[in-house]
Image (tube, rainbow, N blue to C red):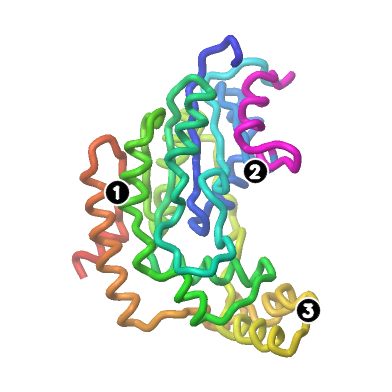
């Protein structure tokens, strides 16, 4: 490790919770936060073809950046470290990110210090809508019904995930927020990650990084797959049938299914907020839903 003493903050995602937006916002502010003793490493630093994320982190920690030889806070952001999204499978998923706690413990032990962990959670049905669209975008097409069977809503248990992370050895502060409140809590998220002073220079990117697929785009992708059309269909469908052009967003769930899963989500949020050792940023979306 380097001679200087520094704290570590690791934003682990989750997938499809505005992670890319936060990463790009931090990347744009990287030179500015360096002036406050913060070193930021994101996916461009931590995704190397010949090295694991763990190896990349350790290498960065022991190899001084000529422009920033010392730092007080090392901020990491890489959602794939705790597990990738949509692994091809034959049986229904039982839980998301089963190896997350063990991987964070491994990193903490290798670095010889506690790691503050940051993550967002999201409404189960909307999370699965987004992960299905992401699978289509990646080129792996499967029917909606099959995806719903392989990735059931009852496997989206954020209380279980946060409990496992909280119990992991080497995890220090654990900060959680609802994706639905990301825009409102952006300043507080950055303040917790890089410190209040450095957070002042981190500005949110003024655009959406990954737009949703419309229902029409998903239907077109599935149709072309049935016709064995292997051309650049995703880019075409997203451009011609974009949500931003007025096409309704894809939704695999009925209003009743959304409502039932929202009730479970609200219960998970409340339980996470009551968990010792967890800092839950005020769940404004959940609060307004409880009043409704």
* Residue at the spot 27% in from the left edge and 48% down from the top edge: 272
Say few, some or many: other residues with alpha carbon within 10 Å of mark 2 (under 14 / 14 to 19 / 20 or more).
some
**Counting residues from the N terminus, which is met first, the one under dot 2 or under dot 1?**
2
Image disc number at residue 168: none
Residue on which the image places disc 1: 282
Could you classify mark 1 by the number of other residues whose Cα lies within 10 Å: few (under 14), some (14-19), or many (20 or more)? some
Q: Position of residue 282 (x, y in %)?
A: 29, 48
* Residue tagged 3: 230
Q: CA distance from mark 1 to mark 3?
A: 45 Å
* Circle 2 residue: 43
CA gap between label 2 and label 1 equals: 28 Å
Q: Residues within 10 Å of mark 3 (few under 14, many from 20)?
A: few
- Mark 2 and mark 3 in contact? Answer it, CB < 8 Å: no
Residue 206 x %, y %: 59, 55
Please give the range of residues in magenta: 45-66
Give the position of the N terminus as an image quadrant: top right
**Measuring 50% from the left and 31% from the top, which residue is drawn there?**
106
Choose the circle earlier in sequence order: 1 or 3: 3
């Amino acid at each position: 490790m380097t001679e200087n003493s520094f704290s570590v903050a690791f934003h682990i995602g989750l997938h499809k919770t505005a992670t890319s937006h936060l990463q790009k916002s931090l990347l744009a502010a990287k030179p500015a936060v360096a002036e406050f003793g913060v070193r930021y490493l994101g996916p461009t630093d931590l995704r190397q073809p010949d090295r694991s994320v763990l190896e990349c982190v350790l290498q960065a920690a022991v190899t001084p950046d000529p422009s920033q030889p010392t730092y007080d806070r090392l901020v990491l952001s890489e959602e794939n470290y705790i597990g990738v999204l949509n692994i091809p499978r034959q049986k229904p998923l039982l839980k998301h990110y089963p190896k997350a706690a063990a991987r964070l413990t491994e990193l903490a032990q290798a670095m010889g210090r506690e790691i503050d962990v940051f993550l967002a959670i999201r409404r189960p049905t909307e999370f699965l809508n987004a992960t299905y669209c992401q699978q289509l975008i990646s080129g792996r097409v499967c029917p909606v019904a099959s995806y719903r069977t392989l990735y059931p809503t009852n496997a989206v248990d954020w209380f279980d995930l946060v409990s496992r992370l909280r119990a992991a050895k080497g995890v220090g502060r654990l900060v959680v927020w609802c994706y639905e409140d990301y825009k409102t809590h952006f300043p507080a998220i950055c303040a917790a990650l890089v410190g209040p002073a450095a957070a002042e220079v981190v500005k949110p990117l003024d655009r959406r990084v990954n737009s949703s697929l419309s229902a029409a785009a998903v239907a077109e992708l599935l149709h072309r797959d049935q016709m064995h059309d292997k051309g650049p269909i995703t880019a075409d469908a997203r451009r011609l049938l974009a949500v931003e052009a007025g096409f309704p967003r894809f939704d695999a769930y009925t209003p009743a299914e959304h409502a039932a899963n929202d009730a479970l989500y609200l219960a998970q949020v409340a339980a996470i907020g009551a968990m010792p050792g967890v800092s839950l940023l005020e769940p404004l979306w959940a609060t307004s839903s409880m009043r409704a």
